[in-house]
Image: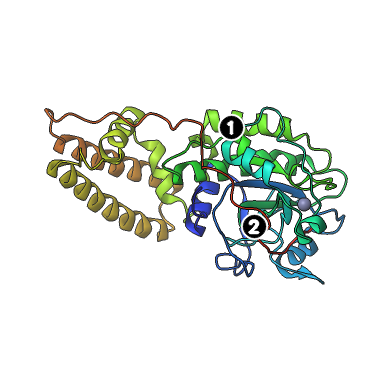
Amino acid sequence: MVQALTPKEILEALAVWGIPNVQESGWRTRSNAQGWRDVTGFMVHHTGNEVSDAVEVKGIIKGRPGLSGPLANFGLDDQGVVHLVAAGAANHAGGGDVRVLQAVQLESYDAFPPAPRFTHEEFLAGAPGSVIGNPRFMGVETFYNTNLTDKARQTMPRLAAAMIWALDRKDTDNAWTARSVIGHKEWQRGKPDPRNVDMSVLRKEIQQLLTAGPTAAHLIATDQNIEVLLMPNIPKANLDQIRVAVWTQPSASTPHSPSMWRIMTQMAAQVASLQSAVTELAKNPAVTADELMVITKKAAEDAVANALEAMPADEEIPAPPPPAPKGRRGAAAPPADGGQGNPP
Ligand SMILES: [Zn+2]
């Protein structure tokens, strides 16, 4: 289990993975009435409509008679652009099967999770073993009914990979893989979506992306991700040293040494000064993107070099913790816990 991603974490993930996006007004605070409980996975949908992207976005934000919005966290349009609709929980998953929830939580399935046993109506009627998905799944509505565009199909696995990557970073106890991504049709009996997408193929694509990881080639320079933009300019060997030395979680028996705290403080100060310098530079139209890259690269390398210099040579640097075993996120939550929400 992990807490929901913050708007900042969502934006950072989209930037790192180079996913084109539009921030719809109010998305940071938009939520359904129930809110998040914990985040267990990511769900893919189609809207079942053949209307314009603008009409699709409005519909997801506002909802429809009998079902209030937001109807998804993200909308994926025909151009492959992600519309940020709600950082809060959305009415997209509806009632589903606790066996599927558990299979996703534990990532304990192979090509497909167990077939879902319940419709949304059966969940509303209190069918034992049915469970609400909205507070547990992030969701994307893809704007199509029969055939999705090539561009949307290209963005689909990248968006899912970006969110799983962000959730994995946030969850310090468990490793997340593509098995945390399911289709609506795998959650609820009778659902067709996402139509014409083989979820086992999609998961393979997502896992390939996660295994390869985001690269500098994915990066887009915007004022939102200037911090992220700096990171690829630091030599990987230095980054690895710093990551291990600074960010390895100390345990109660082996806390960070005073010198380590000194280094962390020093680095934080350097990063802060670097950020304000970059912010100022970015405002100057006379500075070209290439010049900005050179300046920030130099500043980042200096900051890293100073931090490495300050690191005591004789101090033992703890090894990173081993990856978490696959018994992840505990047992499934109790079924039949109320709620609403069941778009196409
Ligand atoms: Zn759906």
| The C terminus lies in quadrant | bottom right
Q: Position of residue 239 (x, y in %)?
A: 33, 34
Q: Position of residue 211 (x, y in %)?
A: 54, 28
Mark 2 crowdedness (10 Å alpha carbons): few <14, some 14-19, many ≥20: many
Q: In the rendering, which numbered label is found on residue 344? A: none
The image quadrant that residue 200 belongs to is top right
Q: Which mark is first along the chain, 2 or 1?
A: 2
Find the residue positioned furthest to the front: 128
| Mark 1, secondary structure of its residue | helix
Labels 1, 2: front one: 2
Picture colour scheme: rainbow
Residue type at the position of mark 2: Asn
Q: Residue at x 24, y 47 (%)?
A: 267
Q: Residue at x 34, y 45 (%)?
A: 296
Mark 1 crowdedness (10 Å alpha carbons): few <14, some 14-19, many ≥20: some
Q: Which residue is mark 2?
A: 73
Q: Is residue 8 left or right of residue 34?
A: left
Q: In the rendering, which numbered label is found on residue 209? A: 1
Depth order, front residue of 92/145 = 92
Q: What whole-number distance in Å separates the C-alpha atoms at marks 1 and 2?
A: 21 Å
Please say if 27 is above or below 130: below
Residue type at the position of mark 1: Leu
Q: Is residue 298 left or right of residue 287?
A: left
The image quadrant that residue 36 belongs to is bottom right
Q: Residue at x 59, y 39 (%)?
A: 161
Q: Is residue 276 visible?
A: yes
The image quadrant that residue 293 belongs to is top left
Depth order, front residue of 97/319 = 97
Q: Is residue 78 visible?
A: no
Q: Is residue 288 left or right of residue 110?
A: left
| Mark 2, secondary structure of its residue | loop
